[in-house]
Image (cartoon, rainbow, N blue to C red):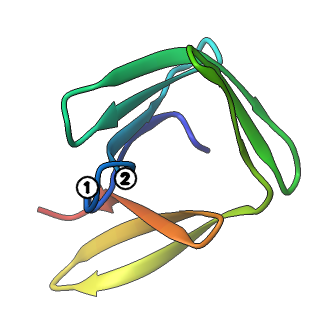
Amino acid sequence: MLVGEWDGDAKGSAQLDRIVFTADGNVVLRYNNRRVLTGPAVVGNSSMIFYVPGGPITYSQWSVSEFDGGYGYTFENLVLDGVSYVRQTGGG
């Protein structure tokens, strides 16, 4: 469900440009300042912890929902503690 690339808005120094979940259980965090952190991701029913250099990053709430972008395009929206990341799942 989460495996693949999710695009963020990359606003501010702490915002992510992209999150990549790998099939082997890791996460790659790409920041807008070109910083890249990689490590294991532990995903629970409502929380996530990314064990990356510099200490774990904890999200207390996460969800994924699908939406229709129109013109035959569909997307999924990943929300981590209120911050949205999107990927295209169909169309174009």
Mark 1 packing: few (<14 Cα in 10 Å), some, or many (20+)? some
At 44% across and 80% down in the image, what residue appears?
67
Q: Give the quadrant of the C terminus.
A: bottom left
**SS category of the residue bearing label 2:** loop
Using the image as rendered, state which of residue 59 and residue 65 is in the foreground: 59
Q: Tell me where residue 17 appears, x and y as whole percent.
A: 27, 46
Q: Along the polypeptide, which appears first: circle 1 or circle 2?
A: 1
> Which residue corresponds to the image point at 33% horizontal and 71% vertical from the top-left?
74
Q: Secondary structure at mark 1?
A: loop
Q: Amino acid at mark 2?
A: Gln
Which residue position is annotated with label 2? 15
Residue of label 1: 10
Would you say the residues marked 1 and 2 are in contact, meaning their CB atoms lie under 8 Å apart?
Answer: yes
Which residue is at a point 19% across and 28% down the rendered structure image?
Answer: 34
Question: Which image quadrant: the N terminus?
Answer: top right
Q: Residues within 10 Å of mark 2 (few under 14, many from 20)?
A: some
Instruction: Locate residue 6, reporting x and y percent.
Output: 38, 48
The disc at residue 74 is none
